[in-house]
Image: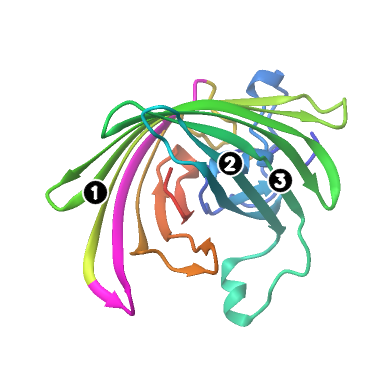
Amino acid sequence: MRNRHLGLIALALPVLPAAGAAPSTAEPPASQPASYVFATELGSGVYDVSGRTLLVYRLPLAYELREPSEDAPGLRLTLPVAVGFFNYSPVDLVHSQLPSHLDAFSFVPGMLLELKMDEHWRIEPYARAGASFASGDFDGWLYGLGTSNVYEWQLHGMHARVLNDILFAGVIYKNPTDPDDNLVRLRNGMELRRLTGLVIGQHEIELSVYGFADYFPDAPRPPIAGTRTSRLQLEPGFLIGAAPQWRIGSFELPRLGIGYRFAGDLSGWHLDISSPF
């Protein structure tokens, strides 16, 4: 199996079993592991590629083209980017050992409609398409479509948000010998955000806690023999930001946080950038 096919490591930072584990038996394409190219949909984390560590960061960039109104839906340009580095650890940043080049890169621009149903409820259908690159070479075409159901309200001085989302994503590889792959995910989540009263300059620190459950009808198969992942995966966590959020020019800096993914044998920590879901 080509090394661009890998198990979904539950968007986490697992301790991998020792090399030399017995290889798994061949399985039909429907049960092949999800590809790292889905990182633009699934999030930042550490993946395994034929025994090598691939650290992936996802940047969920977006640009508001039109605010929603009673007469017309809102329109948002989504620009998710994922970059990956082989055998690189976030701890390396402490020693100023920045990576010299990208080993993996994917960019999947798209459009999102924001349909405002009432003061608290909105529906957001979306579609996107793009490409993945490995070591500078074109790897395959990516696409995804889905819809989110979002409900927001104020709860005892906190901003509450509930989300229900269904996603279908796929990859069409450049090499015809690589079987195309797809991913279906159902997600239900909740986030609570609250100002802390701690002010830095003109910005008040904001803390949010969240939790969500993901269900995969066809559970991704991990690449390590003897390990198991679950169709139902849970993640609690938190993020820190500010109100108003810090900006560099017209660019708003993302909130940062961390979560823990419960996913069977491949449970572990997950870096959050901007939004938990």
Q: Give SS at disc 2.
A: strand
Q: Is residue 268 visible?
A: yes
Residue shown at 30%/68% (left/top)? 205
Q: Which residues are magenta?
A: 198-217
Q: Give SS at disc 3.
A: strand
Give the residue type that dot 2 points to. Leu
**Magenta span includes 251:** no
Per the rendering, the mark at residue 159 is 1
Q: CA distance from mark 2 to mark 1?
A: 25 Å
Residue 86 coordinates in the image, percent (x, y): 72, 58
Query: Camera-side residue: 230 or 174?
Result: 174
Per the rendering, the mark at residue 106 is 3
Q: Give SS at disc 1.
A: strand
Query: Camera-side residue: 208 or 32?
Result: 208
Q: CA distance from mark 3 to mark 2?
A: 16 Å
**Magenta span includes 208:** yes
Give the residue type that dot 1 points to. His
Q: Is residue 18 left or right of residue 103?
A: left
Residue 220 coordinates in the image, percent (x, y): 57, 30
Residue 79 higher or lower than 128, as above or below: below
Question: Residue 35's quadrant in the figure?
Answer: top right
Q: Earlier in the sequence, mark 3 or mark 2?
A: 2
Q: Earlier in the sequence, mark 3 or mark 1?
A: 3
Q: Nearer the viewer, mark 3 or mark 2?
A: 2
User: Which quarter shows the C terminus?
Assistant: top left
Local packing at callout 2 (Cα closer than 10 Å; few below 14, some 14-19, many 20+) is some
Local packing at callout 1 (Cα closer than 10 Å; few below 14, some 14-19, many 20+) is some
Q: Which residue is mark 2?
A: 77
Local packing at callout 3 (Cα closer than 10 Å; few below 14, some 14-19, many 20+) is many
